[in-house]
């Protein structure tokens, strides 16, 4: 039987056709070895993968595996990535956006097979890129710091130039 967190992971996997894997809700670390290799969007495989971890949050692999790259706008540790983001005056199309428990944001872009590298604050302070080999904790995942909530449910837009700086 599916727990609520498992239903959430399976629902998002089905909705976006994205592979997911279980992560520790406290640390955001993968709960399985080879998480990208075991990640799935198929409900029966998710049930099997998540069954030892019924309260797990879920990770969404970025890069070609799901055809996405995510800008991670952090607002913590004295750095406000949102302020830095606005300073860049980027033309961001309406795309999927998830608010994080720290009042930051994950901005999702469709990048297909493009192998965008991960980076930390290379675009600007507090703005990270989650690309090839990276992952984000998915929408509606429940963690001790709060729940990630989707703010905009639009179709993903392709803007690789924004994440390939």
Image: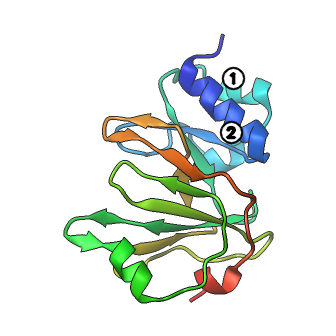
| Spot occupied by residue 62 in the image (x, y as percentages of width and height) | 64, 60
Q: Please name the residue shown 80% across and 33% down the image.
A: 42
Quarter that holds the N terminus: top right
Q: Position of residue 114 (x, y in %)?
A: 75, 76
Q: Residues within 10 Å of mark 2 (few under 14, many from 20)?
A: some
Circle 1: element type: helix
Give the residue displayed 61% in from the left and 77% down from the top. Answer: 92
| Along the viewing direction, whichever of 148 and 3 lies nearer the viewer | 148
Q: Is residue 124 visible?
A: no
Q: Are marks 2 and 1 in contact (CB under 8 Å)?
A: no
Name above or below for residue 48 compared with residue 16: above
Seen from the viewer's position, the closer of residues 103 and 26 is 103
Q: Position of residue 113 (x, y in %)?
A: 80, 71
Tell me if 30 is positioned left or right of 102 in this view: right
Foreground of the two, 105 or 13: 105
Q: Could you tell me which secondary element the residue under label 2 belongs to?
A: helix
Where's residue 98, x and y in %?
53, 53
Residue where numbered disc 2 is placed: 12
Query: In the drawing, what numbered circle is on residue 48?
Result: 1
CA distance separating discs 2 and 1: 16 Å
């Amino acid at each position: 039987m599916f727990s609520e967190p498992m239903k959430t992971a399976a629902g998002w996997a089905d909705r976006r056709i994205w592979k997911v894997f279980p992560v520790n809700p406290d640390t955001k670390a993968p709960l399985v070895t080879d998480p990208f290799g075991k990640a799935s969007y198929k409900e029966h495989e998710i049930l099997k993968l998540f069954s030892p971890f019924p309260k797990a949050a879920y990770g969404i692999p970025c890069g070609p595996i799901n055809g996405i790259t995510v800008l991670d706008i952090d607002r913590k540790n004295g750095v406000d990535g949102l302020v830095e983001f606005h300073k860049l005056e980027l033309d961001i199309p309406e795309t999927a956006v998830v608010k994080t428990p720290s009042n930051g944001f994950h901005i999702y872009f469709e990048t297909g097979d493009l192998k965008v590298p991960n980076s930390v604050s290379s675009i600007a302070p507090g703005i990270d890129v989650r690309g090839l080999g990276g992952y984000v904790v998915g929408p509606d995942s429940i963690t001790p710091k709060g729940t990630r909530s989707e703010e905009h449910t639009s179709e993903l837009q392709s803007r690789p130039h924004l994440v390939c700086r």
